[in-house]
Image: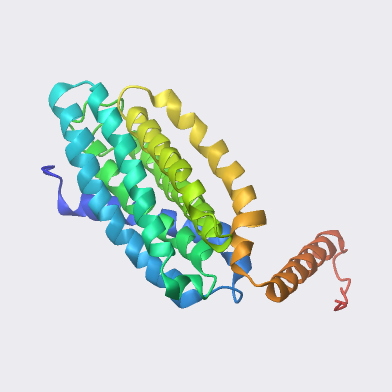
Amino acid sequence: MGVGLPQYQVQILLAIGLIGVYAGWRGGMQRMAGFYDMPNATKHLAFGLVLGAFSGILIDGLFIEWVAELGAVPIESIGLMVFLGLLQALVFHFLLTREGVRLLRAPPTSGWTMGLGMGAIQASYLMIRMADPNWPGFVSGFNMNMIMVGILITICMPALEAILGSWQGSAVVEKKPLSVLWQAGLFRSFILIVVLLGITSQPILLIILPPAVLYGFSIAEEKWLPSALIPSVRQEYQRTLRKATKRAIQKENRELGEFVFDSEE
């Protein structure tokens, strides 16, 4: 990457980048604990980390180096980010449609974890670039402002990539992956362009990331992630969610010192 940062700063930024994996896993997968294929999810998280590293190299060469050299955003680099988003979606399609993944109905949850890994590494690359004192963006150098912007990107970018990964995985289960492939690719391109423009010339664009995450989470948790479950297991999963909601209400409404007797359905 050609950025001469002290090693401790790089390590701190990489650690912050991995926070996105933790937040996204708890945000979308925690309630499904015990209901999905954990080995496949973990393996695809590793795939996502590797894919994120390659994506980071391409982002660095096709966008960031141009911006750092010219001090502006060339229109050609925007087109290249569209191509990269479509390429990422194609790689997701290839990995999630393998027979071993399809037979276990694992594409939605595996797509989620793979998106988390890819988004986390991409966010780390961008934070390392922003930490360069010579970065021509609205924040530069290793300081609190840069770290705050980096945390926003770290939370949102992996989550958005995970949401799109679960969407592609759900389409594989429903046997219509090609119809979602190009749409997911365009959305990935949009994420890249928004984040890259946000850290360079248009920081106002970063405001749209949190609402997009909240909206995507609601759809993924209700529709795309549960599609990994066979009907009988999905019924048990929904029953477990209802029980958890009921217990939470009982705990919130009970008076101090009062016992709550849990009744199973």
Give how far across and how far down residue 119 sits, in percent.
Answer: 38, 50
Q: Nearer the viewer, residue 34 or 126?
A: 34
Q: Residue 36 in the image: x percent, y percent?
A: 56, 73
Q: In this view, does 69 lie above or below 116?
A: above
Q: Is residue 147 or residue 37 the one in the foreground?
A: 37
On the question of residue 73 being in view, the answer is no
Q: Please, is residue 174 above or below residue 207 in the view?
A: below
Q: Identify which residue is drawn at 74% across, 74% down.
A: 236
Viewer-proximal residue among 17 and 226:
226
Query: Up-down: is 229 above or below 180?
Result: below
Q: Can residue 171 be seen in this view?
A: yes
Please name whichever residue, 233 or 68, is drawn nearer the observer in this view of the structure.
233
Of the 4 image quadrants, the one containing the N terminus is: top left
Q: In this view, does 218 lie to the left or right of 117?
A: right
How far across and down, in percent of the image, does residue 146 sit? 32, 36
Residue at x-position 35% and y-position 60%: 48
Q: In which quarter of the image is residue 187?
A: top left
**Colour mapping:** rainbow
Q: Is residue 219 above or below residue 30?
A: above
In the picture, the quarter occupied by the C terminus is bottom right
Side of 146 where 230 appears, left or right:
right
Residue at 57 percent across and 37 percent down: it is 211
Quadrant of the rendered structure where residue 117 is?
bottom left
Count of numbered tags: 0
Indicate the position of residue 254 as horizontal and vertical percent values: 87, 64
Question: What residue do we see at 30% from left, 29% from top?
Answer: 78
